[in-house]
Image: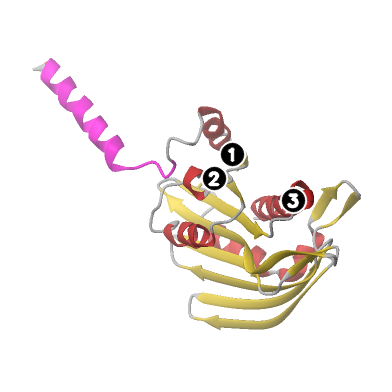
Amino acid sequence: MKKLTLLFAAVLMAFTTFTFADPFNKRLTSDERAKLEAGEVVIRNTGDIDKICMTKNDATRKMIDIIDDLDPAYLAEIIQVRPYQGNEDLLEKAKAVLSNIQDYTTIPFRARAGDYMLYNSAEITEDTINGNSRLILADMDMDPFGLIKTHIDMEENDTSLFFQMMNLNQLRYRDQYNAVKPQKMKSVITIFRDGDNWVLYALGSVDTYKIFFLKDRIETSFMNRIKTFCNFIFTKI
């Protein structure tokens, strides 16, 4: 009888583990998982949407589909896991930080040329709230790409928050070369409840012109800036 009870308990445990799926897939390494469990931010140079470590669920499906449709030349994941207990108001904090566009000009950025702010200026030109959705249009200036006409949209519910930021105009590298077409640089963030935790998950992506002699420089310029932005947001929340 005792053996039968133990067997039943083992089967029940296996079934429970299977039923409550891990939001991450096998591409998340054991070292990366350990860092997430310790509360650290993990940044993965994924490069391809098929290599991300996040599974599709109700909270992540939209962002993954957006990046899949973009089919970017460069892609990175930024991830953090936080306990729900003690962070019950995380979505409200995140919404406040993400919508404070002027605060983007305080994001420090380190480059070969020295240390400066990620954005030189940020000004909202349109702000529309419709129920649980918000649309912000802003003019933002970033070296070495100049003015970025920026589209930001957010959606929220009781258990998740979606954020997307993308360029609306063509971006030029040091005003010499076309670097990115409109709507081809996107940062997408989703924060969602997963059992006893919040998962903060971002995909930073850019699809650039193929300029052979500037490939590495443009990749570094864009991806470092996208990673810096997402990491700042995670730290600020």
Residue at the image point whose x is 80% and y is 58% from the top? 118
Residue 7 magenta? yes
Q: Which mark is residue 39?
A: 1
Label 1 or label 3, whichever lies nearer to me, is 3
Q: Residue furthest left?
A: 1
Q: Which of the 4 quarters of the picture holds residue 32? A: top right
Give the structural element (helix, strand or loop) at label 1: loop
Residue 172, position as x, y percentages in the image = 78, 66
Numbered disc total: 3
**Could you tell which of marks 2 and 1 lies nearer the N-terminus?**
1
Please state, as top left, top right, bottom left or bottom right, where the C terminus lies in the image.
bottom right
Q: Could you tell me if residue 89 is visible in this image?
A: no
Give the structural element (helix, strand or loop) at label 2: strand
Residue 207 magenta? no
Q: Alpha-carbon distance for marks 2 and 1? A: 6 Å
Q: Which mark is residue 82?
A: 2
Residue 223, position as x, y percentages in the image = 70, 51
Q: Are marks 2 and 1 in contact (CB under 8 Å)?
A: yes
Label 3 or label 2, whichever lies nearer to me, is 3
Residue 53, position as x, y percentages in the image = 48, 42
Give the structural element (helix, strand or loop) at label 3: helix
Q: Could you tell me if residue 165 is visible in this image?
A: yes
Residue 207, position as x, y percentages in the image = 63, 59
Write down the residue under mark 3: 212
Residue at the image point whose x is 67% and y is 83% from the top? 126
The part of the chain drawn in magenta is: 3-24
Residue at the image point whose x is 25% and y is 31% from the top? 14
Please state, as top left, top right, bottom left or bottom right, where the N terminus lies in the image.
top left
